Image (cartoon, rainbow, N blue to C red):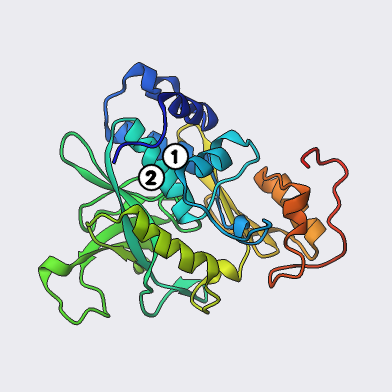
Amino acid sequence: MASAYTPEQIVAWEDHVELPTRFRKSQSPELTIEYLTSLHVHQIAAAPYENLLLHYSPHHSVSLDPQVLFKKIVLDKRGRGGYCMENSLCFNHILKGLGFEVYAAGVRIRPRYGGVPKGDYTGWVHIVNIVTLPDGEKYMVDIGFGGDGATKPLPLVPNTPTHNLGTQEIQLSYSNIPPQTTRRSTQKFWIYQYRNSPTAPWNDFYAFAEFEFFPNDFEVMNFYTSTSESETNFQTRRVLVIRFLREGERIVGKVMLVDGLVKRNLGGKTETVVECKTENERVKALEEHFAIMLTEEERDSVRGRNVDLGGGTVDFPNTTLA
């Protein structure tokens, strides 16, 4: 499938993420890992992981239409990104428009318990892009996982530790996963792992296989993640935003919103920035710490929902958006 985006849209995206001149399509850069890494870094710094459409919108639903995604993430200029399928499918079309060989694959994740991924793998609820460079090297590109997600492409080479953020390391291993009844070499998964120091044990976070998912597959996944009230589906029960902080060509930190709590990590210990106890405070925090501007209609649409912090009318007279 060809990119859904025109050359003009690709230029608009390059401007939006502040891509360096040497990596602009007009300069005909070689399709190298350096180029791919720059695209990754600039994308995650410009488009936050966020599930606000499920809570702060009149329809409380997510469209995966590439043009809807492009308008939201690039053209509207309101600091928006999206959750995994929004960000990654938009980026998939960007990569295709830049000439990369890429396809999207579905991912099974392990839920966090006490902040650590544990227990059984879920169904397909996440997405990564798999890129093959002209030299034949393959990379997993995940720009939509949020908190402990990769800040750069990872080679599809087993057990190759890569620095991520601060003291954290990440890698891919290649093996079967616990629920499988048939544990053959032809049915192995790539497993995304992280550890918070070189001496800490590896945590298995998610698993994917090297087969392509199609738009209809993602529509099924998107329906579940955007509507299910299951305890294993946090999307409909939590308000989440993660923005990565960039200096030049490096990711140096991240700022996160989990429900009403804003936290920041600049490569060391995570610290609490502010605790929002009302909707006024949370909307203000979205603007102040994430540069996300919600319209009046969006602000009002959270009222009465399970994530509503309450606290009276959401009123920001200095906000110019209507």
Give the residue number, with chain letter if any, for mark 2. 152
x and y percent of residue 62 in the render? 54, 56
Q: Quadrant of residue 205?
A: bottom left
* Residue shown at the point (77%, 40%) measured from the top left: 321
- Can you see residue 14? yes
Asked whether residue 265 is in view, the answer is no
- Quick check: 140 left or right of 55? left
The front one of 253 and 15 is 15
Q: Residue 293 carries which label?
A: none
Question: What secondary structure is found at the residue carrying circle 2?
Answer: loop
Q: Which of 24 and 295 is in front in this view?
A: 295
Residue furthest left as drawn = 185
Left/right placement of residue 59 relative to residue 159 reads right
Circle nearer the N terminus (1, 2): 1
Q: Say what secondary structure mark 1 lies in.
A: helix
- Relative height, residue 228 to residue 166 (above, below): below
Mark 1 burial class by Cα count in 10 Å: few <14, some 14-19, many 20+: many
Q: Are marks 1 and 2 in contact (CB under 8 Å)?
A: yes
How far from the left and from the top, in percent, is residue 305? Answer: 71, 70
> Can you say which quadrant of the picture contains the N terminus?
top left
- Which residue is denoted by mark 1 in the rendering? 41
Q: Which residue is drawn at 46% across and 58% down?
A: 148
